Image (cartoon, coloured by chain):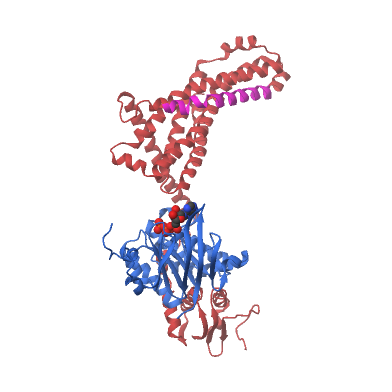
């Protein structure tokens, strides 16, 4: 059993009185793919933003690499960010830089590597996501799926041990999606990185997930392995995997 | 460790150790983004005459290898081979081999950066691009716009009822206060600046000639056009760019409606209809400003001023001013439309289109002013 990289305990969150997370507990085992599932509006993005330190943890506790998120100084938070790659739902590439420059940015900012090495690394990362012929295009010239892959290349630019993905699969065709999953699996197996992923794609979950956290209306209804989730009797979970009673 | 190759400056490398006598390069320790640059640094400093015929890369000491380190190794191998070296490799664990494969380089051809071309070549291709991408398209758009503008005059095509009037209000009527205030101030300043000179020659009365001719033929149309370019040129560009970005122009097109006729032609009518009047108002305000300064500084009363006016008011100047205002109106609408349609994607394109259209239309207006000024001289 691998060590837990992230531990969330009793995390609650509210937006102006309206509670969206109710005493959430779960953990993210290291070097595995943890998938956070749940219907629309169940609080997945909210959890992710708490883990990323974008929302302050008011109630409960979040520990990453054995450090309490709430107790980190600004400098420690910055160092922690260098350990995490984040893949935002809508890409979030900088519009006035081309793809190459976008991905080179974290490397230029955080390392002393020579420019030619950075350029070659970026091209290599773009090849990994299958985007090497788009290096000189600007984000506005990319299609939705290409934007996703460029965003992934940026997220893994620094070889982060911890990779967060918010709906990486949405908007991708099945072939590109399978390639993306394979890439994430490769990164996990060969580099031992830990992946936290929010996704709705059942095929993608079946391929990649090791550990599943299922959210419903701000509460965890299930946490366990993929097999446990598939065997679950809970109606919400069964509906999700398409084995429901057809109640809708 | 004896170094037989010439060391320019003593450098301590953490991630590699070179033994020239056996021709072995030991890669060792952490080959990660903190240190991977060393590998390339070493290669760059290595002088060709000290190279062995066969170089052995020994990986057995590598403890960590990330994407930066892998890339550095790939570049090192490539560069050494390019220098004609025969490479041997040893001590590569399966784990590191797999890592090197995962992070193997992209095909350099696929992403090759644009080659540096010679200056005349670049200048030539820039001019060609300017012509094919901008100048020609701009003229085609002008032809299109004038064609539909003329045709729809006689046949109410795909315009909405009252749209031209709406546009006339937006482009012309709402600009009246600002145009008149600015023209008044410029007339005043113009008279003020020349008053001192004219007084020296005792030529006070010629202030009337100066103000009337300058305002009617030059400043009136120019001020009007610049204000309209700033107010309406930018909003035309932003409106069309927004429609383009949100696919509204595509929607019009697929509904069988020509966006140019539907959106732009009413604006053209609005501008052509109001700019001559706006120019006349600017002339009036400018002359009033000049008369005020003449009265205050040169003791030329209003009766004297306005009595002299008919003598200097040539028909040609009036016509010149009005022709200019029509040309400027067309230019402002055309430039706004052009830059609006140039946008392809993205919200930031809208702002850019607006800025560019203002700058370009003011520049074009001034150039056109010169051309028309020479024609009517
Ligand atoms: N900034 C905000 N202000 C107010 N309420 C918010 C805000 N962000 C999220 N919420 C609410 O929190 C709840 C959970 O939202 P969240 O974005 O986490 O859902 P999600 O599980 O990511 O859904 P989806 O699958 O649609 O992305 C929703 O009810 C939403 O209305
Ligand atoms: Mg979400």
**Magenta-span inclusion, residue B189:** yes
Is residue B367 visible in the rendered structure shown here? no
Of all residues, the one furthest to the bottom in this rendering is: B22
Q: Position of residue B160 (x, y in %)?
A: 34, 29
Instruction: Say whether residue B342 is left or right of residue A72.
Output: left
Query: Ligand 1 is found in which quarter of the picture?
Result: bottom left
In screen coordinates, is A163 left or right of A112?
Answer: left
Residue at the outermost right position: B200
Residue segment shown in magenta: B166-194
Q: Nearer the viewer, residue A80 or B243?
A: A80
Residue found farthest to the left: A246
Q: Residue at x 35, y 74 (%)?
A: A228
**What residue appears at the point 39 percent right and 27 percent down from the top-left corner?**
B164
User: Who is closer to the viewer here, B116 or A114?
Assistant: A114
Left or right: residue B284 compared with residue B336: right
- Whole-percent x and y of residue A53? 54, 62
Q: Which chain is red?
A: B
In the image, A82 versus A106, the foreground residue is A82
Report whether residue A244 is seen. yes
The quarter of the picture where residue B259 lies is: top left
Counting from the top left corner in percent of width and height, residue B239 is at 43, 38
- Does the magenta run of residues contain B51? no
Residue A190 lies in what quarter of the image?
A: bottom left
Identify the colour of chain A in the image. blue
Please, is residue A92 above or below residue B90 in the view? above
Figure quadrant of the N terminus of chain B: bottom right
How many marks the image carries: the answer is 0
Query: What residue do we see at 56% from left, 27% from top?
Result: B178
Pinpoint residue A67: horizontal percent, then vertical percent: 57, 71
- Per the picture, the main secondary structure of the magenta-coloured stretch is helix
């Amino acid at each position: 059993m691998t060590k837990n990289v992230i531990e969330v305990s009793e995390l609650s969150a509210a937006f102006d009185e309206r509670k969206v997370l109710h005493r959430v507990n779960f953990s993210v085992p290291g070097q595995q793919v943890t998938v956070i599932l749940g219907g629309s509006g169940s609080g997945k993005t909210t959890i992710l933003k708490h883990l990323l330190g974008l929302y302050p943890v008011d109630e409960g506790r979040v520990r990453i690499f054995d450090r309490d998120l709430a107790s980190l100084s600004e400098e420690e938070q910055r160092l922690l960010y260098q350990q995490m790659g984040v893949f935002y739902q809508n890409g979030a590439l900088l519009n006035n830089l081309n793809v190459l420059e976008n991905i080179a940015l974290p490397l230029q900012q955080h390392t002393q590597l020579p420019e030619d090495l950075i350029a070659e690394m970026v091209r290599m990362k773009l090849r990994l996501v299958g985007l090497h012929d788009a290096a000189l295009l600007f984000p506005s010239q990319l299609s939705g799926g290409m934007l996703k892959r460029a965003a992934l290349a940026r997220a893994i630019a620094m070889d982060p041990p911890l990779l967060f993905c918010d709906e990486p699969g949405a908007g991708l065709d099945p072939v590109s999606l399978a390639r993306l999953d394979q890439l994430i699996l490769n990164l996990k197996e060969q580099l031992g990185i830990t992946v936290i992923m929010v996704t709705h794609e059942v095929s993608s979950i079946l391929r990649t997930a090791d550990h599943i956290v299922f959210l419903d209306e701000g509460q965890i209804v299930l946490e366990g392995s993929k097999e446990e989730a598939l065997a679950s009797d809970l109606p919400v979970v069964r509906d999700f995997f398409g084995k429901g009673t057809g109640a809708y | 460790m004896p170094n037989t190759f010439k060391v320019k400056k003593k450098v301590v490398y953490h991630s590699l150790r070179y033994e020239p006598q056996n021709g072995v390069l030991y890669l060792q320790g952490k080959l990660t983004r903190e240190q991977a640059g060393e590998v390339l640094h070493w290669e760059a400093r290595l002088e060709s005459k000290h190279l062995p015929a066969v170089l052995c890369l020994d990986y057995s000491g590598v403890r960590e290898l990330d994407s930066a380190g892998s890339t550095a190794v790939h570049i090192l191998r490539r560069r050494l081979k390019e220098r004609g070296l025969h490479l041997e490799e040893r001590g590569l664990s399966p784990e590191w081999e797999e890592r090197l494969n995962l992070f193997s380089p992209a095909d350099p051809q696929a992403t090759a950066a644009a080659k540096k071309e010679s200056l005349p070549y670049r200048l030539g291709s820039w001019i060609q691009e300017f012509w094919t991408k901008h100048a020609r398209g701009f003229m085609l758009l002008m032809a299109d716009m004038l064609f539909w503008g003329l045709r729809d005059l006689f046949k109410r095509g795909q315009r909405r009822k009252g749209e031209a009037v709406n546009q006339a209000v937006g482009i012309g009527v709402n600009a009246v206060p600002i145009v008149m205030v600015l023209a008044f101030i410029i007339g005043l300043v113009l008279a003020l600046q020349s008053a001192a000179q004219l007084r020296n020659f005792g030529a006070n009365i010629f202030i009337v000639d100066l103000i009337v001719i300058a305002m009617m033929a030059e400043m009136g149309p120019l001020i009007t056009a610049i204000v309209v370019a700033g107010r309406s040129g930018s909003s035309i560009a932003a409106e069309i760019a927004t429609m383009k970005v949100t696919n509204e122009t595509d929607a019009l097109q697929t509904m069988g409606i020509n966006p140019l006729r539907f959106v732009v032609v009413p604006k053209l009518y609005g501008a052509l209809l109001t700019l001559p009047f706006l120019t006349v108002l600017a002339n009036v305000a400018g002359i009033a400003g000049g008369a005020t300064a003449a009265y205050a500084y040169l003791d030329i009363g209003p009766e004297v001023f306005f009595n002299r006016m008919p003598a200097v008011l040539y028909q040609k100047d009036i016509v010149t001013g009005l022709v200019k205002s029509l040309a400027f109106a067309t230019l402002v609408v055309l430039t706004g439309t052009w830059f609006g349609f140039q946008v392809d994607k993205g919200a930031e394109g809208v702002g850019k289109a607006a800025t560019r259209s203002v700058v370009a239309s003011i520049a074009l207006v001034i150039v056109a002013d010169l051309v028309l000024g020479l024609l009517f001289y």
